[in-house]
Amino acid sequence: MYKITSMMVLGLALSAFTTAEAAKLTFKITNPNETAKVVLTFAQSNEQKEIAIDAAGNGSIEITDFAPQYVTMQYTRGRRTLYLDPKQDLTLSFNSDDMWKNVTFAGEGAAINTYLGSGQLNSLGMPDMKMQEDAILHRGDSLYAANCQVLESAQLPAGFTALEKVRLQYYTYYYLPLYASYHSYYGKDEDYTPSETFYKKLKALTPIDAKLLALREYKAYLPGAVTALSLEGKTNDSKVIEQRVHYVDSEIKDAEVAEFLMNEFVYGYVENSGLDDADSLIAMFRKHVKDAQSIEKFNTLCGKWEKLRSGNPSVSFSYTDIDGKTVSMADLKGKYIYIDVWATWCGPCRGELPSLKELEEKYAGKYIYFVSMSCDKNKKAWENMVKKDELKGIQLHMGTDRSFMDAYLINGIPRFILLDREGKIISANMTRPSDSRTAKKFDELLGL
């Protein structure tokens, strides 16, 4: 009964446009940043509005023709969740150095926004991944009940209170879907398999309703929940992206939700992994995603990755090694090249070093170069680690030169790349040293 009532309240709240009213937002900022603007992002449409702040720290804007809704406010590095209503003026005062800690509100919209910024709301987090399953389910329920109590104590309008209880579900339980895959590692429980009770709870928390896409927290929660549900009963060998896409295509009947998820999953996969072996995923994207802006953005991404397909020539590189000698790709032709883009400050990068060392030893004297390219800005830190840890292979320093990283669309590290003996791409997103498929690929190429 609660879920049905919540959906009705949400639908009413999100459809109540008021065109005759205008909300005036006034900002009073102490120690303003000379170049920064306040940016508002509306949850329903993702529309953004910018508010210029003068030298004295003052700025204002009148906003019309919008439904009462949650809005994300960003100023410099700080972010805040607001709730704006076209019938209610709001004044925000804060110090630019700590706006994420303390904002005071005045005006008709002050009560709701003071509640949202109170800091009394809590959610599940990564440390909870260590808990046993029954414990984390209980903790999630307890946190949600406590959050609802904070809300009730604020004595806010009934319409907002009902809407906020829906939002609080996804705020509170955001990490719960991740438990299905994270607990084995964080809880040191390799044999863990989510129970029927876990999936029952997850399904109860995950209604498929396009109206909920107006909530930023639901959009953040939903991909993780659908991923967990798509892997129910599957082995660890299941390819996650394929299971996700198949689940959306076969189980999600709400076309708008299916479009949102397919765009999230396929765009995210191609952005990180490229076009090789992605034809079936792209076909699913074309089937479900109809929004012209999303299609244009995806087509642009595919155009960039097209240059990185297997068989295309690699972009060249030329960087200095640990001895100060310049090494270019042309110097390495005649052997396969396994490239590791990394940095000394990157934990996952360092985590791959023992496995990389094993590969270097196993294939020593074979027709393959192991090239490690550091993007450390601090060259001394790189030099010290290479020498102290006696890192092998060809150690190159890229520093602030992002030409190679940009050419390979590298937005996160570590990233591994495999080139053939002529400098052509075998894989622009090769498996890591710790992945058993890496050695198998080397054996196949080298005829071992």
Image (spheres, rainbow, N blue to C red):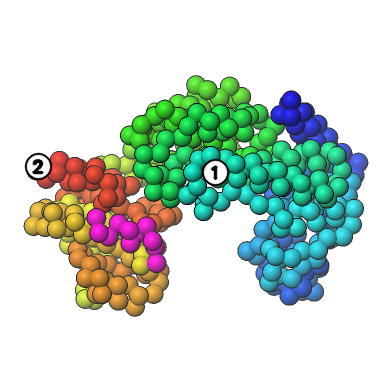
Front residue of this view, candidates 139 and 25 = 139
Disc 2 marks which amino acid? Gly
Element carrying mark 1 = helix
- Count of numbered circles in the view: 2
- Can residue 377 be seen in this snapshot? yes
Kindly check if marks 1 and 2 are in contact, taking CB atoms under 8 A apart as contact: no
Quarter of image, res 255: top right
Q: Position of residue 6 (x, y in %)?
A: 75, 32
Task: Give me the residue at 45% from left, 29% from top.
Answer: 232
Q: Nearer the viewer, mark 1 or mark 2?
A: 1
Residue 216 among magenta residues: no
The location of residue 249, given as percent across then percent down, is 50, 24
Kindly identify which residue carries mark 1: 135
Q: Position of residue 86 (x, y in %)?
A: 86, 46
Residue 347 - label: none
Q: In which quarter of the image is the C terminus?
A: top left
Q: Looking at the rendered structure, which numbered label has been put on residue 447?
A: 2
- Mark earlier in primary sequence (1, 2): 1
Q: Which amino acid does label 1 sit on?
A: Ala
